[in-house]
Amino acid sequence: MKRIAILTSGGDSPGMNAAIRSVVRYGVSKGMEMYGIMRGYTGLLEDDMMQLNFSDVGGIMEKGGTILKTARCEEFKVDRGRIEAYEILKNRKIDGLVVIGGDGSLNGATLVANESNVKVVGIPASIDNDIYGTDMCIGVDTCLNTVVENIQKLKDTASSHERAFIVETMGRNCGYIALVAGLTTGSEAIVIPEVKVDYQALSDKLLSGKKRGKVNSIVVVAEGAASAYTVARHLENRTGYETRVTILGHVQRGGSPSVFDRLLASRLGANAVQSLIDGKSNIMVDLKGSKLSSLGLDEVLQTKKELDIGLYDLANTLS
Amino acid sequence: MKRIAILTSGGDSPGMNAAIRSVVRYGVSKGMEMYGIMRGYTGLLEDDMMQLNFSDVGGIMEKGGTILKTARCEEFKVDRGRIEAYEILKNRKIDGLVVIGGDGSLNGATLVANESNVKVVGIPASIDNDIYGTDMCIGVDTCLNTVVENIQKLKDTASSHERAFIVETMGRNCGYIALVAGLTTGSEAIVIPEVKVDYQALSDKLLSGKKRGKVNSIVVVAEGAASAYTVARHLENRTGYETRVTILGHVQRGGSPSVFDRLLASRLGANAVQSLIDGKSNIMVDLKGSKLSSLGLDEVLQTKKELDIGLYDLANTLS
Amino acid sequence: MKRIAILTSGGDSPGMNAAIRSVVRYGVSKGMEMYGIMRGYTGLLEDDMMQLNFSDVGGIMEKGGTILKTARCEEFKVDRGRIEAYEILKNRKIDGLVVIGGDGSLNGATLVANESNVKVVGIPASIDNDIYGTDMCIGVDTCLNTVVENIQKLKDTASSHERAFIVETMGRNCGYIALVAGLTTGSEAIVIPEVKVDYQALSDKLLSGKKRGKVNSIVVVAEGAASAYTVARHLENRTGYETRVTILGHVQRGGSPSVFDRLLASRLGANAVQSLIDGKSNIMVDLKGSKLSSLGLDEVLQTKKELDIGLYDLANTLS
Amino acid sequence: MKRIAILTSGGDSPGMNAAIRSVVRYGVSKGMEMYGIMRGYTGLLEDDMMQLNFSDVGGIMEKGGTILKTARCEEFKVDRGRIEAYEILKNRKIDGLVVIGGDGSLNGATLVANESNVKVVGIPASIDNDIYGTDMCIGVDTCLNTVVENIQKLKDTASSHERAFIVETMGRNCGYIALVAGLTTGSEAIVIPEVKVDYQALSDKLLSGKKRGKVNSIVVVAEGAASAYTVARHLENRTGYETRVTILGHVQRGGSPSVFDRLLASRLGANAVQSLIDGKSNIMVDLKGSKLSSLGLDEVLQTKKELDIGLYDLANTLS
């Protein structure tokens, strides 16, 4: 192992830069030549990469987004596209590749590992927290804090009117962000794709909260379950409440990463490079509790991460 | 002057609690008996008030919202409703009234001043910043920081795609929040009710930004000018960009007040009470620069606050 | 199990209120009568407790500190004091006790479990992160984010002078806070009790950073290793740098808890009560990765939590 | 006016970058050639400057510190040093100079205006808020919010012990930061250079607060009045309280600028350039209320800014 490239792909998440910094600096400290590929697999196909030295990644850990940019790449999904990519990696004498991203990105990673001579290690980064095999993906903790800080502000607004605030969160098909944000703000209700929504029960819950003296109600909705506007319409019809909608959107992808994400990214980045040096490939590095660990990308990609439904019950019990 | 009541009315804004604290404590320090009226004019009509002592308003300065709650009150707009209210104030032996809120609230305040024996002083509090005669209303500074912190996170998200983020802000018919938030985040474009929107020019601006190498564009839209979704559709049609919408909604009304709002509210609160003690009535207290000042509620309510269009030009020049 | 009491003890940490809320509400949902003991073991000895219902713990999750207050209690360390306490618990018909706190608090907990008929479960809460058997104590994540946000501001200040900023962090005999804060801010050096400080090597590192073009240097010092002023004096003498000291002090104990701490506290709180209902005692509940777990208080108290020295090496490699 | 240079000097403050961005972009929009001088007057003497175009100042508004760096410069205080500087400005064909900084920096500015052919406009930037003629200096608002956010965390920590927290703030000989931070956090006492400290009265105040049921006390101390450690020792001796000290230090200079500081800096930056184009010199631009204004540097430098002692009385009345 002599020359290692790194790319970020798919939706960006806070902490990607901390991972890039760690990959590059750890690699350099081990005598590797490190290369940064721009815009994920798109940049790989265009041979858009540059060498990165120790100081090139200074001052980036605290920044949201990714200095390498990301893109979705349709071309990489077809065989011909990838063959070109392998040619480019070969010409560049790249022996190892670190891929930082979510499911789609790791899918690309395993293709490279299986189809070329380049060894590949994946690092899970996605605000959706939908990747099997790791407790947490890079970016989830920061995203959650952004959502919760905003919901907390909602809880301040005073009203003697009957009113419900509907907050829509990201997460694609995974309800994790909505679930944990709802649980940790004591929100009245949580709508997630993993649990069939019952608008009548939801309305009854808000109305019973009103009887207990609550004047405001907050409902957190995962984008994968329903649109906030749909939920609002249902609740208005059944409760007679006024509703107000908050759509945070891509705000949830940004922000300076939390300490948790910086630490996770720093540890995984170094571990990914060390794994390559140790001759490993086609794996994803992850953190289990406080210990570094890894597992095969096949297993990662073929297993669905199950949401801990106990958290949903806990949220209902405590709110 | 012996007994002074205080109410908050209309849309709440961060800093109202700091004003309540200051009114109550300053009043108590001057030997007044202070009363808090719940839910604005609605609570007044229901005689829903209680005496507030020094310690009753401890620990509230840092909290968003208002401990006195607010409400809109249709009944107070008819003569018969108000006559009842004056009867209640008379029975309670209330000599002075401090009204904290926006245009509608101050309108109620001047009616009380003109129609009853109670002396009335208004304090401008509204995130819309649409009240004539004061540089800043209580709550605007906090609201702006909330909006800007969120837009700042949007600026982090990386993309190689052509993409525009549309952020809708509050402000009713006033573009101040959108204008200053756009200016202080270097957003590509600002859509406000005070300036007729030209979607073609807006689209051209985004496309020319792309030519200069920008990969993301942020457009801040005041709710009084257009819906973010409308702006998004126009831009998609004309630029071919993907768009993403952020609606902060009532998040903008919440949050722990900024130092500016705490200081403004603390100074205005004490000044309102002192003005009542000095025998003044039918005025609004305000801050001009760093000096306390006041002006008649008639003038406040009959004059439209003009947006400083120079700020709009400055935003365009600098972005 | 019918009646469960809860206390917080020792140094407070953010998230204690989230744990209290979860303990009380989960207990109530299981038909328990819940009691809150004020000021830790001190309040227990004074029979200073009250019943807590579902709504008594509303709106506290987001608050720093503990609504039950804490205190250190010398009297509880002597047999006679504790015998009185057991009498009080018996008179109150308390069957179970949840103790939230650090090492000292858990030590009290195991005494109660061994010496009385009351079943006891501990919940680890301490910003020092020095409790064996749990990945993280409640409060550590919030504390770390507070420290890192402040250090991040330090990194902004510009200078062409040679200058070093020394930041002293809490943690008693444990260097975890300083270590992770230093690692996740890319600080130039970290001084912790677990690694003997070599002022000459430290000075050389700063001087070599200067040669690489750095104009500012940040050194994070754990209070258990040295005073910031001592480190500053050593560095001034050896490097000729000006130094500036930051002592965050108890700021590190406060703040609204992070999502991580709220979630951890909510899960542990419910689990503690369920463990009591299941007849368990003399244990501490904890989270391993994303799974709830528990272990005996004897093991917790007799085993020293070792700092992961790999993190120290990683920090040195990456900075 | 064809070519304008800009420098930042003295202690940095948040918002300096927003001012630089505005100066450069406004200048470019008016057809000027804009130059950035590195490290204040030091860089000027070393002819260390570069042309700055529109895109060179992109993405800097939200950053603390100053991209141009700052330094103190002894050499500029002697005539010979300055004569060299004027030679350099002449060779560079610089017609106008914008100086961003505090008292010392503006002193340099007036010397250049009086002794050379270069026209000079100053912009007040200093967290100390000690410059005559402007309501607020750039950086004060951000600094205050940093201090207040930290004190707010202090207020969270629970205790049944008698304890006082002493917080030392910056501000050199000016008590403004301490005064406003103390007022807007409801701190028990404020120690500033403008009011002679009476430790006995201070101690009595804390003890009387204890009688009213307060368990924590916060004292804010301006560095220009006393060291926090001195105040702590006095209070310990007279009250028997434990004390805990917080020294924020240069943390107060950093952080992403608040909206207020970004807006102030953007407006002053553009106004400074326009003033130069209009042929003005030897003035400082400032904001009075919401209106742009200016005054002669002689008046600025010869007049002491008086602290509004009414704010001190208000703080005492309200806490």
Image (tube, coloured by chain):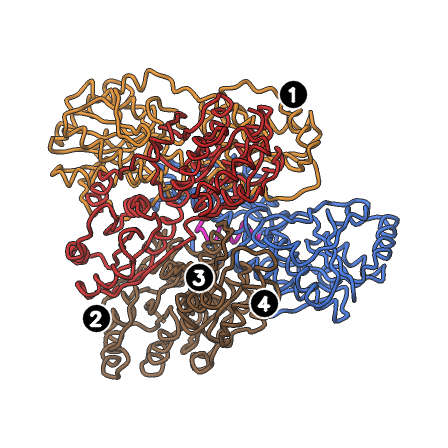
Chain colours: A red, B brown, C orange, D blue
Classed neighbour count for the residue bearing mark 1: other residues with Cα under 10 Å, few (<14), some (14–19), many (≥20): few
Checking the image for residue B167, the label placed there is 3
Residues tagged by mark 3 and mark 4 found on one chain of the structure: yes
In the image, residue B304 lies at what x, y percent? Answer: 47, 79
- In the image, residue A275 above or below residue B80: above
SS category of the residue bearing label 4: helix
Residue extent of the magenta highlight: D176-188
Figure quadrant of residue D136: bottom right
Badge 1 is on which residue? C200
Establish whether labels 2 and 1 are both on one chain.
Answer: no
Identify which residue is drawn at 49% across, 25% down.
A276
Q: Position of residue B219 (x, y in %)?
A: 49, 63
Residue under mark 2: which chain is it in? B
Disc 3 is placed on an element classified as: strand
- Marks 1 and 4: same chain? no
The residue that appears at 87% across and 50% down in the rendered structure is D84
Question: B226 above or below B256?
Answer: below
* CA distance for labels 1 and 4: 54 Å
Camera-side mark, 1 or 4:
4
N-term-proximal mark, 4 vs 2: 2
Q: Could you tell me which secondary element the residue under label 2 belongs to?
A: loop
Residue B46: which disc? 2
Image coordinates of residue D147 in percent, x first then y, are 51, 47
Distance from Cα at disc 4 to Cα at disc 2: 50 Å
Q: Amino acid at mark 3?
A: Val
Q: Chain of mark 1?
A: C
Check disc 4 and report the residue beneath it.
B316
**Residue density around tag 2, few if under 14, some if 14–19, many if 20 or more, within 10 Å:** some
Q: Residue at x 25, y 41 (%)?
A: C21
Q: Amino acid at mark 1?
A: Gln
Disc 1 + disc 4, Cβ < 8 Å: no
Is label 2 in contact with label 1 (beta carbons under 8 Å)? Answer: no
